Image (spheres, grey):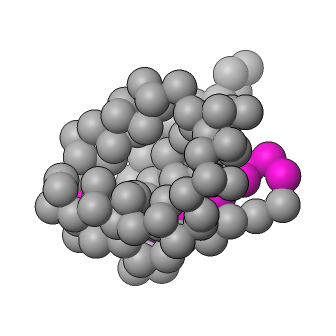
Amino acid sequence: MPRYMFKASYTAAGVKGIATEGGSARRDAVKRAVESIGGSLESFDFAFGDPDLYAVADLPDNEAATAMALAVNSSGAVTVHTVPLLTPEEVDTAAKRDVQFRPAGG
């Protein structure tokens, strides 16, 4: 299953929600959301500053990752950036592909 990293930055309203509900409640809410679209939450960690949070999830496909980002971003409490993660084996396969590319001016 493809893996994605979500880097999240909370708005003032989101920070107030964390202060009220606590960090573990937020982790549990994200876990439920990920599971609702057929995925599993691998990690969920708060950080100092921007971004405020890093989460890694296994999701069925790009559409599921997009659905997650749309739901989170539309809340207004947080802005999330989604990063697709590749395994070393996927990079090995990609490196073996023949790409017909000519640089500008080349």
Left or right, 4 with respect to 49, comes to left
| Front residue of this view, candidates 97 and 39 | 39
Q: Which residue is at the far right? A: 49
Q: Is residue 77 above or below residue 3?
A: above
- In the current view of this chain or complex, which residue is farthest to the front? 20
- Residue 66 appears in the picture as rendered: no
Is 43 placed left or right of 71 in the picture? right
Q: Out of 53 and 60, give the one closest to the viewer.
A: 53
The N terminus, quarter of image = bottom left
Question: Is residue 54 part of the magenta span, yes or no?
Answer: yes
* Residue at image coords 62%, 70%: 45
The residue drawn where x is 28% and y is 71% is: 40
Residue 83 visible in the picture: yes
Residue 98, located in which quarter of the rendered image?
Answer: bottom left
Q: Nearer the viewer, residue 96 or 12?
A: 12
Instruction: Give the quarter of the figure containing the C terminus.
Output: top right
* Quadrant in which residue 36 is drawn: bottom left
Q: Which residues are magenta?
A: 49-59
From what the image shows, is residue 99 above or below residue 78?
below
